[in-house]
Amino acid sequence: MTHTVFLALGSNLGDRLKNLRAAIALLSPVVQPVACSPVYETPPWGFVDQPKFLNQVLQARTQLLPEELLDHLKGIENTLGRQDTFRFGPRNVDLDIIFYDDLVFVSERLEIPHPRLANRAFVLLPLAQLAPEISHPIEGLTVREMLASTTTEGITLFSPGGCGSLQQDDQEIP
């Protein structure tokens, strides 16, 4: 069975855009991107004394089960040289499962939908570019409604080209 998933990608070390592109390239063949949001430059969240992030969301299809998908994403992070530091610390690549169909899933290793989604404008803004009307299966709010409850202050459009463009555009998001 094929599942629709939304994945959040982030990077704040090294060549951030190259890191995002490399992560997307390594998803295939078991995860097939369908659509990619623009890339946004965002202030750090949680631990603020670190470089700014580039963040992006993509919609994809996969036949992997949730924890198999998690293992695949962690493998990509490792392949791209992610080093464990501390919670919310700097990283060259971070891949998170935001939604997996309309599934609510909780295990020791994974929680879907992502447990902090409703508070993270750096995920909600790019997600709203792809799927503004998707409802959070627990919160009962759409992505657009959750985004309206957060602040996008400090977030700028970095690359409007989605999955393939390496063009930079520094426009402040209203």
Image (cartoon, rainbow, N blue to C red):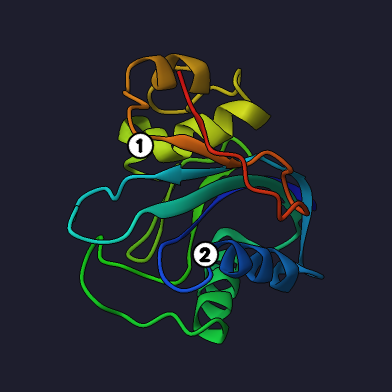
Q: Disc 2 and disc 1: Cα gap in Å? A: 19 Å
Left or right of 168? Residue 171 is left
Q: Amino acid at mark 1?
A: Arg
User: Badge 2: how crowded within 10 Å, few (<14), some, or many (20+)?
Assistant: many
Q: Nearer the viewer, residue 53 or 31?
A: 53
**Residue at mark 2:** 16
The picture places residue 130, in percent across and down from the top left corner, at: 67, 31
Within 10 Å of the Cα at label 1, are there few (<14), some (14-19), or many (20+) other Cα atoms?
some
Please state the horizontal and vertical placement of residue 4, each as a whole percent of the image. Answer: 71, 44
* Residue at (58, 76) in percent of width and height: 76
Q: How many numbered callouts? A: 2
Q: Secondary structure at mark 2?
A: helix
Q: Is residue 26 above or below residue 66?
A: below
Quick check: can you spot residue 4?
Answer: yes
Residue for point 48% across, 68% down: 93
| 27 vs 89, nearest the viewer | 89
Question: In this figure, which residue is indicated by the disc labeled 1?
Answer: 120
User: Could you say which is closer to the camera, residue 139 or residue 19?
Assistant: 19
Residue in the image at 33% along x and 27% along y: 153
Image check: 2 left or right of 94?
Answer: right
Q: Is residue 5 visible?
A: no
Q: Amino acid at mark 2?
A: Arg
Residue 100 falls left or right of residue 104: right
Tag 2 near tag 1, CB within 8 Å: no
Question: For numbered disc 1, what is the local secondary structure?
Answer: loop
Residue 26 circle label: none
What's the residue at 78%, 69% (across, down)? 28
The reply, left or right, for residue 174 in relation to residue 135 is left
Tell me the quarter of the picture where residue 157 sits.
top right
Quadrant, the C terminus: top left
Q: Earlier in the sequence, mark 2 or mark 1?
A: 2
